[in-house]
Image: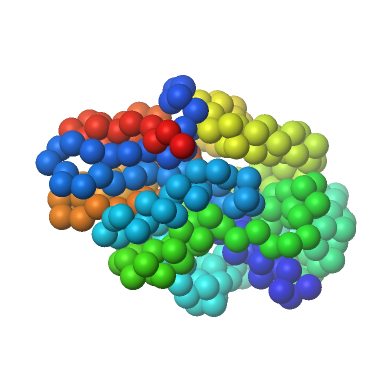
Amino acid sequence: MKNKLSFIILLAFVCVMQLNAQILWKVTGNGLKNPSYLFGTHHLIDKDKVPELQKVLSLVKDVDVVVNEIDMSDMMGMQMKIMKGAMMKGQNIRDLISEEDYKLLDTEFKELLGIGLDKLGSFKPAMLSNLYSVSVYTKNKKISKEPEALDLIIQKAGKKAKKDIVELETADEQIEVLFNSLTLEKQAEILVKSVKEKEKGIEQMQKLDEAYLAGDLKKMEELYSEDEDMTEEYKKALVDTRNLKWISKLNKLFETKSGVVAVGCLHLVGETGLIKQLEKNGFSVEPVKL
């Protein structure tokens, strides 16, 4: 059970205008000597279902660096940081919700993980939400073998090809966004709602999978915008602000190096998305045909 919980925690941590149904993009122009590439990942999809992945892995050999949201080489260290950053200080989930909702959540977690809130209650509600959603996903998909995250697969390929690994943010910065962007009260409200609306969540997960495998970033963006729990403030912290920080780093990086940039697919699109931002900075971004 300890191994299962660790696996789910890592999956939960490691977390979209019609764009010709593409999740792999080529970046050229603006003085680049060699092209770079953008690839949108889905952290829970099995690698064998993503035909673009093989193309991405072949492109790794042709670039100077591999760029990911975070460096995932020290998984044990990352897990320890997650555990520490996701814990509440002096509070318990019981302090944030009604006794009735507590009993509901306790029953759900025991059924999914074999662990109740007596063991998990000190985690911040945002972490519990992630644990819950990933557990529901793996159970609904009947996943028995732990899928390896696409981001990690690409990062390993980069190291094997002796490429430098560049992270767009640190694990600490990502932890801050995921677990501290909303108040604990708001996090708890979202957690209870997700448990009470489990079937709706499963339906949304299925739609997201279908959209990703079809390369339909427009549909993914629509599903994201339809999420009632994603306030404008949270969207800004989770996506917009991070995108703008990342694009600054990519602009500087591309001055001297070419790279394969693999980030969550949501970060590719929209006005603050990496595709639009690169275009605004004078680059040409076009879909890669398989």
Q: Nearer the viewer, residue 282 or 187?
A: 282
Residue occupying image coordinates x 18% and y 36%: 29
Q: Nearer the viewer, residue 137 or 56?
A: 56
Q: Is 20 placed left or right of 95 in the picture?
A: left
Tell me: residue 188, above or below residue 118: above
Query: Among all residues in the image, which is located at the extreme top?
Result: 18
**Residue 67, percent across and down?**
35, 56
Q: Is 155 placed left or right of 102 in the picture?
A: left
Residue occupying image coordinates x 66% and y 70%: 6
Residue occupying image coordinates x 46% and y 43%: 40
Tell me: residue 211, above or below residue 188: above
Q: Nearer the viewer, residue 63 or 230?
A: 63
**Residue 83, percent across and down?**
58, 71
- What's the colour scheme? rainbow
Q: Is 47 placed left or right of 118 in the picture?
A: left
Q: Nearer the viewer, residue 268 or 20?
A: 20
Tell me: residue 244, above or below residue 6: above
Numbered marks: total = 0
Query: Among all residues in the image, which is located at the extreme left?
Result: 31
**Residue 153, percent across and down?**
51, 61
| Res. 132 visible in picture | no
**Residue 145, percent across and down?**
73, 62
Screen quadrant of the N terminus: bottom right
* Res 244 quadrant in image: top left
* Res 3 quadrant in image: bottom right
| Res. 61 visible in picture | yes
Q: Is 214 placed left or right of 194 in the picture?
A: left
Residue occupying image coordinates x 70% and y 49%: 133
